[in-house]
């Protein structure tokens, strides 16, 4: 056997070795605690019924068991239902909403589980997610796959293997089973099936782990390579699955990106640009916001070619569709100055926002490198063309938006406004997983769904 073919044969086992034997550090655990707080903030209002979700009601009619598979599916759905959960640049998807549902669902069956063990499994899952994103290459997403669903299945399976102390051989086997079950299409964006992708991925990860631990044998080599090659368009890099593993940990660098707005991450720098233009327009026009529509001739948003691939909805008919509309997000930011959960809830879009959104025109900047080369360089430039001939313009890059940061305590407050300060403090403290009972208390809370007339 040649040296190259031997190296290829070892990729799955090498990844399994990393999953089983690598040891996260204190910095990584600190970042993991922040990730758990962010996930809990966006999942809990769905789990506990603060926000009604018709998709969840339908899912629960079909999946109503109390087993780990069902709990992982339901929590995966809940964590992604608001599209407010974290994002990872290397992964090009939402890792926590697949990984944490698996860990908390399994935690219900491990009474003595300590926080550090769950944190380490979470860190391993994020590392695997980031590595999979790099290894898959840009063509996987561009081909129409939803990374959260496809690559997320494997990342969550890796986290489960670590949590359950699976051996290297069992881990290699379950990664192959997970790859076989991985699926999910971007064509389902702006529908309830998008968050269901996260649920299905979490469920599949649990199933893959359980089957492998039960002794079901699949191929231990070449499966991951086949998975990556099937949608990589020749740009896949399987070697990146393990090269320089944990140096640094992917949860540290580039780290999890916590969303400041309950919309597609591909709209955020456009929203920030529009918010700044709102202030400029108020200052220079001296007119009330009610006259903004009549004052503007048009609004143009410019971005790198392909930079609007996720935010593909141009004329949303519902608040859920509006999460994926550059036009609506820009209009909402100009009119309201902020993007609230209620602006993107189920039901019809708001008439004044929708009307202003009709003035927004998209324009790809062909002088900029295509977005697929490096999404980290994405920008949005928004220009207001006033009826008097004046132009107001603001350009915000993705990195500038990220640098603005986010207060996770405030996000928890915005997601759970009816809770008291004491109740929110208790939730935040649970997310630290610093006491022996915290893991079970948080796991039970996140996997016990409210019973209502709609659910």
Image (spheres, grey):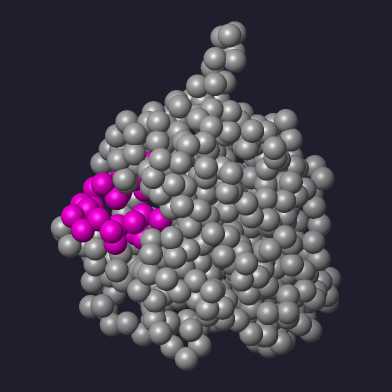
Relative image position of residue 42 (x, y in whole percent): 44, 69
Relative image position of residue 137 (x, y in whole percent): 64, 36
Residue in the foreground of this view, choosing between 290 and 129: 129
Quadrant where the N terminus sits is: top right
The correct choice, above or below, for 136 with respect to 273 in the image is above
Asked if residue 107 is among those painted magenta in the image, a careful observer would answer: yes
Snapshot quadrant of residue 266 = bottom right
Residue in the foreground of this view, choosing between 100 and 142: 100
Residue drawn 61% across the image and 30% down it: 225
The correct choice, above or below, for 433 with respect to 219 in the image is below
The correct choice, above or below, for 453 with respect to 128 in the image is below
Residue in the foreground of this view, choosing between 79 and 284: 79
Farthest bottom residue in view = 453
How many labels sit on residues? Answer: 0
Residue drawn 68% across the image and 56% down it: 185
Is the magenta region chiefly helix, strand or loop? helix
Q: Is residue 89 shown to the viewer in this render? A: no
Left or right placement of residue 336 versus residue 253 in this view:
right
Residue drawn 18% across the image and 55% down it: 112
Q: Which residues are magenta?
A: 102-124
Residue drawn 45% across the image and 25% down it: 14
Relative image position of residue 446 (x, y in whole percent): 35, 69
Asked if residue 421 is among those painted magenta in the image, a careful observer would answer: no
């Amino acid at each position: 056997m040649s040296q190259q073919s031997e190296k290829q044969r070892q990729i799955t086992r090498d990844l399994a070795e990393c999953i089983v034997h690598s040891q996260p550090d204190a910095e990584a655990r600190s970042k993991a605690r922040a990730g758990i707080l962010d996930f809990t903030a966006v999942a809990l209002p769905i789990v506990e019924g603060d926000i009604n979700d018709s998709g969840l009601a339908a899912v629960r009619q079909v999946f109503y068991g109390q087993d780990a598979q069902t709990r992982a599916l339901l929590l995966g759905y809940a964590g992604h239902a608001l599209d407010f959960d974290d994002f990872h640049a290397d992964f090009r998807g939402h890792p926590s909403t697949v990984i944490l549902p698996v860990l908390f669902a399994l935690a219900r069956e491990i009474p003595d589980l300590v926080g550090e063990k769950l944190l380490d499994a979470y860190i391993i899952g994020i590392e695997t997610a980031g590595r999979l994103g790099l290894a898959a290459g840009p063509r996987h997403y561009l081909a129409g796959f939803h990374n959260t669903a496809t690559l997320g299945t494997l990342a969550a399976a890796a986290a489960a293997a670590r949590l359950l102390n699976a051996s290297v051989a069992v881990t290699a086997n379950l990664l192959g089973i997970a790859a076989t079950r991985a699926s999910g299409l971007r064509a389902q964006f702006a529908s309830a099936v998008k968050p269901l992708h996260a649920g299905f991925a979490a469920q599949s990860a649990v199933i893959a782990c359980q089957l492998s631990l039960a002794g079901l044998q699949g191929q231990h080599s070449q499966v991951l390579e086949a998975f990556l090659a099937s949608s990589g368009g020749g740009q896949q890099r399987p070697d990146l699955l393990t090269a320089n593993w944990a140096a640094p940990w992917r949860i540290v660098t580039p780290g999890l990106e916590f969303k400041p707005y309950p919309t597609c991450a591909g709209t955020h720098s456009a929203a920030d640009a529009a918010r700044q233009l709102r202030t400029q327009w108020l200052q220079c026009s001296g007119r009330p916001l009610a006259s903004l529509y009549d004052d503007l001739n048009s609004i143009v948003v410019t971005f790198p070619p392909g930079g609007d691939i996720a935010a593909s909805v141009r004329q949303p008919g519902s608040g859920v569709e509006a999460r994926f509309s550059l036009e609506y997000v820009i209009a909402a930011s100009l009119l309201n100055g902020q993007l609230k959960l209620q602006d993107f809830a189920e039901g019809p879009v708001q008439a004044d926002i929708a009307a202003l959104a009709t003035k927004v025109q998209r324009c790809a900047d062909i002088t900029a490198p295509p977005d697929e080369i490096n999404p980290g360089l994405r920008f949005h430039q928004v220009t207001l063309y006033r009826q008097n001939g004046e132009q107001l313009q603001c350009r915000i890059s993705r990195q500038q938006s990220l640098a603005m940061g986010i207060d996770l305590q405030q996000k928890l407050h915005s997601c759970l406004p009816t809770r008291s300060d004491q109740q929110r403090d208790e939730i935040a403290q649970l997310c630290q997983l610093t006491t022996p009972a915290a893991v079970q208390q948080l796991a039970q809370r996140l996997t016990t769904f409210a019973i209502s007339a709609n659910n």
